[in-house]
Image (cartoon, rainbow, N blue to C red):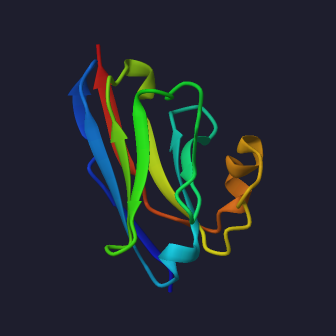
Amino acid sequence: QVQLVESGGGSVQAGGSLRLSCATSGYSFTRSCMGWFRQAPGKEREGVAVIDRNGSTRYADSVKGRFTISKDNAKNTLYLQMNSLKPEDTAMYYCAADPSCRTYGATTIFKFRTSNYNSWGQGTQVTVSS
């Protein structure tokens, strides 16, 4: 059974940093493609950052240069380092898995489609105050 458990969310002031973690189990983490998504109240869920099984990454324009996605295959854990946080980053953040890595080598738009990810965590709240 695939399980994704996020942690690391919280409340910070603008300009601060947070590091999200996503502990995974129940599938081959090393062969999968993974992503971080977020959803603010009243808005659709959107892609933030994705990482292929070979470590190739893509980012939403709104977070480029501020966020870094990474993974530790030995720990089956995905990370999202968030720096220079802004109030508009406030959202519930979700970890998502594409175990078959169907998005491998695809365009960024395709990689950010939520329908390509069949396993999701419960989310962790990030709140940034001005």
Residue 103 in the image: state x and y as whole percent. Answer: 72, 60
Determine which quarter of the picture holds residue 108: top right
User: What's the residue at 43%, 28% (across, down)?
Assistant: 89
Residue 113 in the image: state x and y as whole percent. Answer: 72, 49
Residue 109 in the image: state x and y as whole percent. Answer: 75, 41
Instruction: State the residue in front, 21 or 107.
Output: 107
User: What's the residue at 32%, 23% (across, down)?
Assistant: 84
Residue 79 in the image: state x and y as whole percent. Answer: 37, 54
| Whether residue 30 is situated above or below residue 114 in the rendered picture | below
User: What's the residue at 51%, 42% (across, down)?
Assistant: 38
Determine which quarter of the picture holds residue 125: top left
Quarter that holds the C terminus: top left
Left or right of residue 31, residue 88 in this image: left
User: What's the residue at 37%, 20% (across, down)?
Assistant: 86
| Whether residue 126 is situated above or below residue 12 in the rendered picture | below
Left or right of residue 40, residue 123 in this image: left
Left or right of residue 93, residue 112 in this image: right
Instruction: State the residue in front, 106 or 84.
Output: 106
